[in-house]
Image (cartoon, helix red, strand yellow):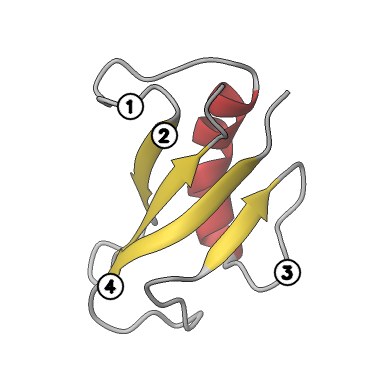
Amino acid sequence: MSEVTASVVSQKGTCVAGHKVGDEFVIGQETPPGLCSWAFYALFPFSQVLRFGGAFPWEKDPDKAIVACPDADNPVVFELRRPSD
């Protein structure tokens, strides 16, 4: 089981949680301190796929996934990454 890190790679508008480019969070089974719970709910399914060795066919790198929070007016985009072997 790999550790997955979520990094903010883009933020447009006003994030009410205050997330900004460069923020990083380790995604586990609970919402990491400081991470918006709405973002966590969006990231969690993708992080679990990566943690357990899966990959997404639309990503060029099998060790990552790009996921946006659900706020369409003020999107925060995260890159999820597991360590490469």
Q: Nearer the viewer, residue 42 or 47?
A: 47
Q: Position of residue 48 (x, y in %)?
A: 61, 29
Quadrant containing the C terminus is top right
Name the kind of residue labelled 1 in the image. Answer: Asp
Position of residue 45 relative to residue 42, above or below, is above
Mark 4 and mark 2 lie on one chain; the one further toward the N terminus is 2
Q: Which residue is mark 4?
A: 74
Q: Are marks 2 and 3 in contact (CB under 8 Å)?
A: no
**Based on the displayed image, in which of its 4 quarters is residue 11 positioned?**
bottom left
Q: Position of residue 37 (x, y in %)?
A: 61, 61
| Secondary element type, mark 4 | loop
Q: Which residue is mark 2?
A: 64
Name the kind of residue labelled 2 in the image. Answer: Lys
Residue at 39% x, 79% y is 15
Quadrant containing the N terminus is top right
Q: Are marks 2 and 1 in contact (CB under 8 Å)?
A: yes
Distance from disc 1 to disc 4, alpha carbons, whole Å, reads 26 Å
Mark 1 and mark 4 lie on one chain; the one further toward the N terminus is 1
| Secondary element type, mark 1 | loop
Badge nearest the viewer, 4 or 2: 2
Name the kind of residue labelled 4 in the image. Answer: Asn
How packed is label 1: few (under 14 Cα within 10 Å), some, or many (20 or more)? few
Q: Are marks 1 and 3 in contact (CB under 8 Å)?
A: no
Distance from disc 2 to disc 3, alpha carbons, whole Å, reads 22 Å
Residue at 63% x, 27% y is 51
Distance from disc 1 to disc 3, alpha carbons, whole Å, reads 28 Å
Q: Which residue is mark 3?
A: 33
Badge nearest the viewer, 1 or 4: 1
